[in-house]
């Protein structure tokens, strides 16, 4: 399918593809096995200016948008979703500042993120606040020129590795989600520590840790926006970043199809390559059809966001859901086409299957995404009928 990429978009795609082929594919199995954070690959991405894509030029970025960023995420995900999530979670951490931060905060934090010198992370989830994000209990109490943070954030991607954390905490426990606020917390602030690195089914080279706040004092000027808008900061951020998870799904699925196609051409059974059997052909065809449909939806959503649209929760949730459900199905089918080889660590299909599962869970489960789509549909319909 021709998506009529500009010369610059084509360059971003090719550059990322080159890094994926040369730097990620040769080491992805080893990084996965050792659960090793891909620091040197992230340095390569920084050297190639890929952390700068979505950041405006006045803050040291390249001034592109969501679309160019997802092109990079897709290419990285074809090779390894553990690497691509470490890259994409940086944008998740940066977007609250980009969307709601003060001029001073943007100047102070975004150029380091754009250069790749500083990684970012986003802290919303807690032990009792996963799908129900409004159930957070971490507090940020005013004390003179400071806010004092207490509580624990769970399963934070880039936890421990990132330098800049955007964290949602309650400034007024009595107001529910209207009492939530967003903050910037720098690594190294006294009272801010990390839990152990979680052991995961997939995306094993990425870092997932708790963020632990124990009387952690941060300057008052580190609040993003103002008190009480923390839930909106989180939701608006997720609206922008969920297509990135969709792009992970598209990339992973394409990578799995490529592996299945190559394998089924080489594997001979009953005297012929297994892709000459119609049973296998139909699986390959269904994989290709659903991947292209997912790609078209993810690209269209990213372009809608970049067009300056104000409300796109439904589109964003739909793109995330469709593309990541596709990734899961395609990864399962790729393993099936490889048969016994697909189950072995020697081939990349089993890692892709393990990695695919989290895409249906993080940045909001696909069940929650369906709620978002349905509620928006109902809202739009009742407006129409009014
Ligand atoms: N943009 C702007 N405002 C939004 C919004 C959005 N995308 N989503 C919700 N809001 C507003 C609502 O308009 C509402 O405001 P009012 O009270 O003024 O009407 C308020 O926020 C509360 O919304 P709602 O009642 O829909 O909140 P719920 O508690 O029912 O939760 C869901 C909404 C389930 C969608 C939210 O909790 C969610 O996204 N959960 C998943 C969290 C997630 O993705 N976690 C992953 C962690 S980050 S890796």
Image (spheres, rainbow, N blue to C red):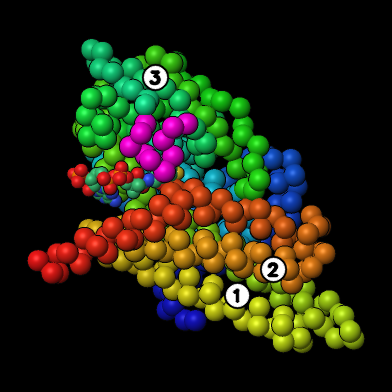
Q: Which mark is residue 377?
A: none
Instruction: Say which label, 3 or 2, has the lower sequence index.
Output: 3
Range drawn in magenta: 127-136
Q: Is residue 290 above or below residue 19?
A: below
Helix, strand or loop at mark 3: strand
Circle 3 residues within 10 Å: few <14, some 14–19, many ≥20: many
Q: CA distance from mark 3 to mark 2?
A: 45 Å
Is residue 123 at least partly visible in the picture? no
Q: Residue at x 39, y 59 (%)?
A: 370
**CB of mark 2 near ligand 1 (< 8 Å):** no
Q: Is residue 59 above or below residue 289?
A: above
**CB of mark 3 near ligand 1 (< 8 Å):** no
- Residue 4 placed where, x, y %? 42, 79
Q: Which residue is mark 3?
A: 150
Q: Which mark is residue 287?
A: 1
**CB of mark 1 near ligand 1 (< 8 Å):** no
Work out whether residue 30 or residue 312 is closer to the camera in this orientation and state it.
Answer: 312
Q: CA distance from mark 3 to mark 1?
A: 47 Å
Q: Which residue is mark 2?
A: 334
Helix, strand or loop at mark 2: helix
């Amino acid at each position: 399918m021709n998506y009529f990429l500009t010369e610059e978009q084509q360059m971003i795609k090719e550059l990322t593809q080159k890094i994926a082929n040369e730097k990620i594919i040769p080491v992805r199995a080893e990084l996965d096995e050792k659960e090793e954070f891909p620091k040197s690959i992230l340095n390569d991405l920084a050297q190639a200016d890929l952390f700068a894509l979505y950041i405006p030029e006045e803050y040291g970025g390249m001034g592109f948008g969501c679309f160019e960023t997802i092109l990079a995420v897709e290419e990285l995900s074809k090779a390894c979703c553990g690497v691509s999530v470490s890259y994409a979670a940086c944008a998740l951490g940066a977007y609250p500042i980009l969307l709601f931060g003060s001029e001073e905060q943007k100047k102070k934090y975004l150029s380091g993120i754009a250069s790749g010198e500083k990684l970012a992370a986003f802290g919303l989830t807690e032990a009792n606040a996963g799908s129900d994000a409004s159930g957070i209990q971490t507090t940020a109490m005013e004390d003179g020129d400071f806010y004092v943070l207490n509580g624990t954030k769970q399963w934070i991607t880039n936890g421990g590795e990132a330098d800049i954390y955007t964290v949602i905490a309650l400034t007024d426990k009595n107001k529910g989600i209207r009492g939530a606020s967003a903050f910037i917390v720098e690594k190294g602030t006294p009272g801010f520590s990390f839990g152990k690195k979680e052991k995961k089914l997939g995306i094993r080279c990425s870092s997932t840790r708790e963020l632990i706040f124990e009387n952690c004092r941060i300057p008052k000027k580190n609040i993003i926006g103002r008190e009480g808008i923390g839930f909106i900061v989180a939701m608006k951020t997720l609206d922008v970043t969920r297509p990135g998870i969709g792009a992970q799904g598209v990339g992973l699925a394409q990578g799995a199809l490529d592996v299945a196609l190559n394998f089924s051409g080489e594997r001979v059974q009953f005297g012929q390559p297994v892709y000459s059997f119609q049973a296998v052909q139909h699986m390959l065809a269904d994989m290709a059809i659903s991947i292209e449909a997912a790609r078209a939806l993810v690209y269209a959503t990213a372009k809608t966001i970049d067009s300056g649209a104000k409300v796109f929760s439904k589109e964003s949730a739909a793109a995330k859901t469709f593309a990541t459900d596709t990734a899961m199905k395609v990864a399962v089918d790729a393993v099936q086409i490889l048969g016994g080889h697909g189950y072995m660590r020697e081939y990349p299909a089993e890692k892709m299957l393990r990695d695919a599962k989290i895409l249906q869970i993080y940045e909001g489960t696909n069940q929650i995404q369906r709620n978002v789509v349905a509620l928006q549909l109902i809202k739009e319909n009742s407006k129409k009928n009014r």
